[in-house]
Amino acid sequence: MISKKKYILYSFAAVSLLYILSSVFSVREIELLTKPLFLPILLYYYLRKTNSKSEIHTIICFIAFYIGEMLVLKDPEGFYLLSLVFFLIPYLVLLYYVTNDLLLIIKNYTLSKFAFFFFLVLLFLILLFVSVILTINTDDIIEKIILYLYGLSLILFGIMTVILYVYKNSKTNFFLLMMVIAFIISDMYFIFMKKIDYNWVFKLVNLVTQIFSYYFFVNYSILRTKKNNV
């Protein structure tokens, strides 16, 4: 028998699929209906799995992500820079906690035999993301500052995450690593669409990795919250 918590994930998957298809094929009515739903569904899933013993920084991340997504939904051009600011907030919050986690375990080094594979994958993505950031050509100083700050925070987030995974190969850190990889790919293809070419392939990759990044984020947050409440 399927549990209620599984039904929440199935609902998230169904809503996300409808959102991706409606966005790629420009079915605005369905996009307006589905996009406001998938993050609240994940937040509800997080609260159920943690028995309402939520962490305030996780709630802040959910709120910032949601506001950013709604700004993009309302007017992606008009709220472009403002939405980037809201998407930046969770990166900075997560970077702070990842740094703290790393400092706590750095003295007890144990090398994972799978760590180098993920290190190489993430290193390649980081280098690719850096090259994309450096090719951005804009005369807007504010936009350039926000994008550089956005890129720098994500690069530091990625480096810290892979070091953390090297030190401690756990399920929590695995979801964290997958989340960062999804963030990098999603943001990279968002920049491709914004600055290089807007096409359905870039759009599809951006949306799919975006959805997976939120899925990995909620699973990482659940495991971390449970560990902290033990």
Image: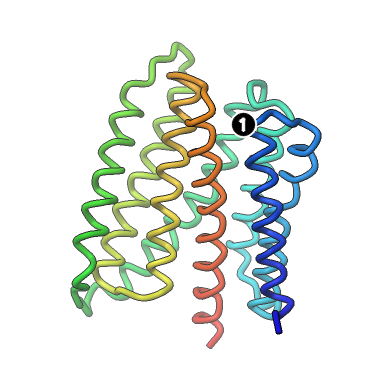
Q: Measuring 65% from the left and 50% from the top, which residue is drawn there?
A: 16
Going by the numbered disc 1, the residue's amino acid type is: Leu
Q: Measuring 39% from the left and 51% from the top, which residue is drawn there?
A: 181
Please name the residue that numbered disc 1 is placed on: 82
Can residue 142 be seen by looking at this rendering?
Answer: no
Q: Measuring 56% from the left and 72% from the top, which residue is drawn there?
A: 222
Q: Measuring 69% from the left and 37% from the top, which residue is drawn there?
A: 22
Above or below residue 153? Residue 52 is: below
Can residue 52 be seen by looking at this rendering?
Answer: yes
User: From the image, which quarter does the N terminus lie in?
Assistant: bottom right
In the foreground, 113 or 72:
113
Residue extending farthest top: 139
126 lies left or right of 86: left
Q: Which structural element holds mark 1?
A: helix
Above or below residue 103? Residue 21 is: above
174 lies left or right of 224: left
Above or below residue 98? Residue 181 is: above
Q: Position of residue 145 (x, y in %)?
A: 44, 27
213 lies left or right of 105: right
Colour treatment of the image: rainbow
Residue extending farthest bottom: 230
Q: Position of residue 196 (x, y in %)?
A: 43, 19
Task: Give the number of callouts.
Answer: 1
Residue 117, located in which quarter of the rendered image? bottom left
Above or below residue 33? Residue 38 is: below
Q: Position of residue 3 (x, y in %)?
A: 71, 80
In the foreground, 130 or 101:
130
In the foreground, 164 or 196:
196
Q: Position of residue 93 (x, y in %)?
A: 50, 55
Dot 1, crowdedness within 10 Å: few (<14), some or many (≥20)? some
In the foreground, 103 or 68:
68
